[in-house]
Each structure stands twice: as structure tokens, then as C-alpha cells.
Image (tube, grey):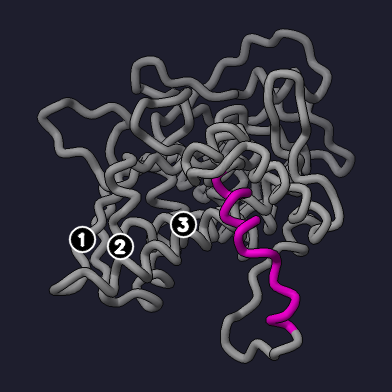
Amino acid sequence: MQANQKFSRLPLAGLSLDMARHLPPLPALRAFEAAARHLSFARAAGELSVTPGAVSHHMKQLEEWVGGPLFERRANGVGLTETGRVFATRLGAIFDQLTAVGAAARVPGGLSTVTVRCQFSLATKWLAPRIGKFRKAHPDISVAVMALPHRWSAREPDPDLAIYHGRGTIPGVRQDTLINGSLIVVGSPDLAATLPPASTPADLLSRPLIKVDYAEPGWHDEGWEAWFAATGFGHLELRSTLSFNLVHLAIDACLSGAGFALVPDFLVETELCTGRLVDAFGISLPIRQPYVIMTPDANLARPEVAILRSWLLDQGLATAKLG
């Protein structure tokens, strides 16, 4: 969290001259952004048309300015430290915005629509409640959100951006982590009140458990068995009398008091804040496959795509801080 705070972006308006003098070395920032993307000083040097030694010099200069390491030097290359990872995420978003601002000035006739293909429950519980903020900040950019399955056929047009769980690299597509998060057990306040005062996970075995049973071929996520295993139980064969193929349907069922459900914490932020749902045990299970933003390389140069992508990454960072 300290790293996140350290590299929080300062508002451009009202910067004093003294603050401006403390900007990091700009050529080093450009070299770092490239090296962080490639995880290679040599490939970054090729992109920037400089020598690997020049990139290495820039990295030492930037690390001295930061006051700590940004990369871990390894025998087979380099990796980002946690500070470097946070810095790279924020800096990449800033570079996207700079690219977008420059490109927008050259685009005649304004900006076009950005299509976002997204997993159903994330579109419903996370993206839709936030998109109004983007529209207020960027009223000149039209956004079309499509909640659709992860796989699409060659007959369907490719979206400008796609948000799904990451499943490995895709040639020609940049993937940036949007949200990690954890799975938590939630239930309505009335149902949670039926648990003993000093309840343990074992008490859930006699309560109604709602299961999320994904219908999409090849899709899987951690379930109740994994959560119970994380709390110290061995292998359990659980029977559920109620299941849904979408997380947000399980959440709605929880709200009605139908049972307890194991759901991503970032999809029930509002319900937890308003008290309509409660975190029954405070025991979380890290999600193994984070949500990522997938952007075809050809779309990165489009200013409207870059602006929305940068905004979404900022929203992901803000969500992580809340967690």
C-alpha cells in the first residue's frame, strides 16, 4: 500500500514550481515504461533505438530518484519488484493518456465508439455502476458494453477492449491485470444471525449453500470445497440444493435470504457497505485467475480506446485499495 501511495499521481492543475522541479527524469521514465512492458532491457533498447547500456543507465538513475530497486536482476533477465510493478501500472496509464491526448488532437470529426466485451457478472456488478463516472469525465466518447461469453466466433466483430479472467498470452493482444480480489462468504443479515455467536466454518455445513456452476466449457473457479480446505477441512463432498451459472444471480439469491454464497469481494462492495449482505466469517480465498483487460495491439493507438483503458485500470487500482 505504501508503494501505491508513493506513486499516486498529483493533479496537474495548481502544481507549484517547486513541485515541478521534483519530477523524475523524463527520459528514464520512457526507458522504464518500455523495460517494464518487455521485462527486458535489450528489447526496450531496440524499441527506443538506444543501446542496452543506455537503458541500464536510465534504470539506475530512476532507482536513485525513487530511492529503491524497481527491478530484480536475474540470470535469465529481469523482473519487477512490487514497487516497480505499481509504478509500471500507473506510468503505463499515464503514457496511454499522453498518447491519447496527442492522437485526439489529430483526429478529425471527434472520437468514435469504444466497444467493451465483458464477463456477465463483472459487467453487471462492477462496470455498469462505474461507467457513469467515465461518461461525465469524457462525454465525447461513446461506450458500448456487451455482456457476452468469453469465447466468440470469427463471424462476430472483435471488441475494442475485452475484460475476462486471464488464460495465458494471446499473440497480438496486450493484457493488463485489472482486478485480483478474493472470494468471501456472504449472506443476508437475517440468515447470518442464525449462526451461533462463536461460529466456525463447520457451522456452514448445516446451512443452505448456493453454488456457482459455470456453464461455459473449460471455465472453472475456486468453489466451496477449496474454501473449506483453506479453513482446515479435508476433502468434502458438498451437496447444494441451489446453483446458478452466473455470480450476480447467486448474489441476488443471497439478498433474498436463500443461502450463503462464495463470491468475489469486489462484486459485493455496495451490498456490504449498505449492510444488505454481510461477510459471514472474514475468511477470504485469493482468486487464482485475475480479471484482465485485453487490448488488440492495433487498438492501442486509438485515442478513445487508450483513454477508456487507462480509466479502467485506475478503477481497478481503486478497487484493490478498497479491498
99 shown above or below 167 = below
Q: Are marks 1 and 2 in contact (CB under 8 Å)?
A: yes
Residue 183 point in image, percent of width and height: 64, 36
Look at the magenta stretch and give its main secondary structure.
helix
Comparing 141 with 80, the one in front is 80
Residue 240 point in image, percent of width and height: 53, 21
Q: In the drawing, what numbered circle is on residue 304?
A: 2
User: Can you tell which of label 3 and label 2 is closer to the viewer?
Assistant: 2
Residue of label 1: 113
Q: CA distance from mark 1 to mark 2?
A: 8 Å
Residue 321 point in image, percent of width and height: 69, 57
Comparing 118 with 278, the one in front is 118
Answer few, some or many: residues within 10 Å of disc 1's Cα (few below 14, many 20 plus, some between 14 and 19): few
Q: In the image, which residues are magenta?
A: 19-34
Residue 91 placement: quadrant:
bottom right
User: Can you tell which of label 1 and label 2 is closer to the viewer?
Assistant: 2
Q: In the drawing, what numbered circle is on residue 312?
A: 3
